Image (cartoon, rainbow, N blue to C red):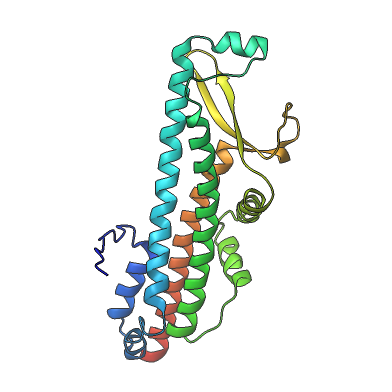
Amino acid sequence: MEVLHLDYRPKTGGIVGSLQTRLMKSSSAKLRERYDSYHEVGLGAIGSAVATRLALVLRVSFRLGILLKRLRDEIEETGRVGELLDNGWAFVTPDSRIFYDICVTVDACYFEFRSFYEIVGKYVIAFCKEMLDREVSEKELIQVLEDAGVDTSWIEPVKDTRKLFFHETAPWIALRIHERSPLVCSLLVLKENVHTFDDADKYITQDQLVDAIEGLQKASWEIHNWLVLRIEEVEELESA
């Protein structure tokens, strides 16, 4: 069987690439020696998964933004925003595929957000064990974030939402109108077919989606900084 491989190595090496460089150039002979087994103990494969997942998170987030702009422009071009709102009518498009494209992208966002979070955790736990010779749990890592003042309130909602859309229902969408002309709107992701919006637990706002992606990135870099400090501790002990 002939197979053509594709070089799509992500440019988003992020925390993984810099940690590898840090170990390779470490003043600690012990850390440099442990790094020799980096790929053998599986950290290379997990690290590649972290970098790829981050690239996927960024791609689905970017795609969602493009689709929302396209939908907003289409609605505004009709000149019927006021009429639709005043009469309580739904916007009908000649090509409803854009609605489903947005729904599937929202689905992909939550899948990728949670997958990235889980794989980063797996990488950090393995890194600590194999490179730093210390055990660390997810609970401890969350505490690291909270001690650093990083918001962690998005973690459980992302987990619950991915589970909801994967096992129980499908996402639906609506638009919150902030201004009619020029049209300013934001996405609402509905967890069920709601007609009133007085219960915030039944929908997700675009701001909450943005908070999740920003929270992921801030958390991953805060954990990276924490790992660098743990590397420095090993170096200081060895040089003492």
Q: Position of residue 93 (x, y in %)?
A: 51, 20
Residue placed at 44% from the left, 51% from the top? 57
Residue 71, compared with residue 38, is above or below; it is above
Residue 211, compared with residue 83, is above or below; it is below
Q: Is residue 148 left or right of residue 43?
A: right
Q: Is residue 221 left or right of residue 114?
A: left
Residue placed at 33% from the left, 74% from the top? 20
169 and 130: which is toward the camera: 169
Location of residue 89 (image quadrant): top right
170 and 87: which is toward the camera: 170
Residue placed at 31% from the left, 86% from the top? 36
Residue 77, compared with residue 154, is above or below; it is above
Farthest front residue in view: 1
* Residue 240 shows up from this direction: no
* Residue 195 shows up from this direction: yes
121 and 162: which is toward the camera: 162
Q: Position of residue 88 (x, y in %)?
A: 67, 14
Marker count (numbered): 0
Location of residue 18 (image quadrant): bottom left
Residue placed at 40% from the left, 77% from the top? 43
Q: Position of residue 41 (x, y in %)?
A: 41, 84
Q: Is residue 85 left or right of residue 79?
A: right
Q: On the rendered image, what quadrant is the N terminus found in?
A: bottom left
